[in-house]
Image (cartoon, grey):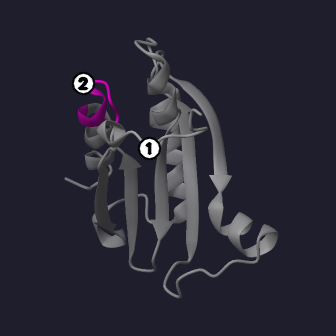
Amino acid sequence: MQKCMEKLSDYEYPIFKTEIMKTDTKFNTMEKMCDEITRIIKSDPKLTWLCDFDHMKHTLDVVKGPVREDIKAARCLVFCFGISIPNPLVLAARPRSFGVVDVGDKFIISFLAAPREGTNETMTAWIDGLVKK
């Protein structure tokens, strides 16, 4: 009998993460930070903007789950980068999202590594651009 779901270890991806002190960016509130990342995403004609998911609200209001004490806000900015479908399994890694978490004095921004070459570099450059020069 065939298994319903099988874990494919070749399709595990690392997570990219950066921490930006609020004093190191002009986008020093959760609203400003998420608005700027959303603006960047929407300005790319090859992307489709999907949603701004308030993960904190979901966790607290819907599932009544715990949230680490220092987390003040947590949102997922969801979009699709997919420009091709090279195989059926690539859809498991789509759509893309940035996790944006406010922990008081800084933001922690993360994303799951993309399978397509160049995508991780693009997303990293967007986030690096949020820091004041």
Question: In terms of secondary structure, where does tag 1 sit?
Answer: loop
Contact? badges 2 and 1 (CB < 8 Å): no
Percent of width and height locating residue 118: 24, 25
Marks 2 and 1, the one that precedes in the sequence: 1
Please determine whether, in this image, residue 54 is positioned above or below residue 67: above
Please determine whether, in this image, residue 118 is positioned above or below residue 76: above
According to the image, label 1 marks what residue?
A: 7
Percent of width and height locating residue 77: 55, 46
Q: Residue furthest left?
A: 133
Does any portion of residue 72 appear in the rendered image?
Answer: yes
Percent of width and height locating residue 126: 32, 40
Left/right placement of residue 13 relative to residue 50 reads: left
Tell me which corner region of the image, top left, top right, bottom left or bottom right, holds residue 24.
bottom left
Which mark is in front, 2 or 1?
A: 1
Point 69% across, 77% down: residue: 65
Task: State whether the magenta stretch is mostly helix, strand or loop.
Answer: loop
* Three-letter code for the amino acid on which mark 1 is drawn: Lys
Q: Residue furthest front?
A: 1
* Three-letter code for the amino acid on which mark 2 is drawn: Glu
According to the image, label 2 marks what residue?
A: 117
Please determine whether, in this image, residue 106 is positioned above or below residue 132: below
Q: Which residues are magenta?
A: 114-121
Q: Is residue 80 magenta?
A: no
Left/right placement of residue 67 relative to residue 25 reads: right
The quadrant of the image that shows the N terminus is: top right
Point 36% across, 70% down: residue: 22
Question: In terms of secondary structure, where does tag 2 sit?
Answer: loop
